Image: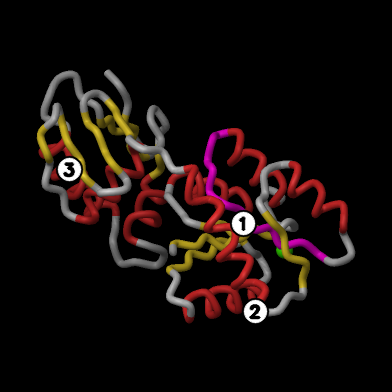
Amino acid sequence: MQVLVVEDEQQMADLLRRTLEEEGHQVIVVTDGREGLEIARCSPFDVIILDVMLPGMSGIAVARQLRESRVQTPILMLTARDAPSDIVKGLDCGADDYLTKPFSIDILLARVRAVSRRGAVARPVWLEIGGVKLDPASRRVTRDGQVLGLTPREYKLLELMMRNPGRAISRDTILESVWGFGSEVNENTLEVFMRQLRLKVDTGEPKLIHTVRGFGYRMQEP
Ligand code: CA
C-alpha cells in the first residue's frame, strides 16, 4: 500500500516509516500539516497516518479539509493520551480511527489494515477531462475512445492532474508525487516529460493542459 505519514516528531516518523516499510508498504513522510494536506489532495494514498499536533496546520484541520474536498482516503489519527478531546474532534472531522501515543507496533499495523479495508470502497471509478478518460483501477487512459500508451511516470503525472481538475499544481508537488522525495529530477526533466505527455494526450484543440507561469501546471475542461 501507499501510506502517507504526517508526523513532525523525527523519532516517531522514523519508527512509522521503518515499521511500515518492513511490512512492504511504500511510505512518504511529511512533517508539516499544510504540506500533508497538499500532497494528500494531489496523490492517491491507501492510508494516511496523521498526527494531531503539527506545525503549519493541525491534523484535525487537515482531516476536515481533506473530507471537504472529497478526498476519502482512510485516516488514522495519532493523538496524545492526555488529550482525549482530540480523539472526539478527530473522529468528528473525518478520521476513521485513532491511536493514542505511545502505541504498540502490532496495534498500529492492525489498525492500518482495518482502516485500509474500510476505505477501499470510496475510490472514483473514472476520471474524465475533455474526452480524456483515465481508469485508476486498470490504469488505462483513452482519448476519444482510443487507448493511449503511456509510460508509468507519464501515467502518474496525468493521474495527478486529472485528480485535481482546474487546480494549479506546483512543480514541487509534481516532482514529489511523481518522482518521490529527494530524487535527482529537476524542473527541466519535468518539462521534457510534460512535453511528451502533451504530444500523447493533448493533441486536440482547445488544449487541456495549461502551463501556470512561474508555478506549475493545470488541467481543465476547455
Ligand atoms: Ca506532533
Q: How crowded is mark 3: few (under 14 residues within 10 Å), some or many (20 or more)?
A: many
Residue 74: say if magenta.
Answer: yes
Q: Quadrant of residue 140?
A: top left
- Report whether 215 appears left or right of 92: left
Dot label at residue 105: 2
Residue bearing mark 3: 197
Q: Quadrant of the N terminus?
A: bottom left
Residue bearing mark 1: 32
| Structural distance between the alpha carbons of marks 2 and 1 | 23 Å
Q: Residues within 10 Å of mark 2 (few under 14, many from 20)?
A: few
Task: Specify start and end residues of the magenta stretch as a single range.
Answer: 69-80
Q: Does dot 2 land on a helix, a strand or a loop?
A: helix
- Report whether 218 appears left or right of 194: right
Q: What's the residue type where badge 2 is placed?
A: Ile
Q: What's the residue type where badge 1 is placed?
A: Asp
> Which quarter holds ligand 1?
bottom right
Residue at 30% x, 30% y is: 128
Circle nearer the N terminus (2, 3): 2
Q: How many numbered badges does the structure rendering display?
A: 3
Q: What's the residue type where badge 3 is placed?
A: Leu
The location of residue 158, given as percent across then percent down, is 27, 42
Nearest the camera: 28 or 78?
Answer: 78
The answer to whether residue 61 is above or below residue 207 is below
| Structural distance between the alpha carbons of marks 2 and 3 | 42 Å
Question: In the image, which is nearer the foreground, mark 2 or mark 1?
Answer: 2
Nearest the camera: 212 or 151?
Answer: 151
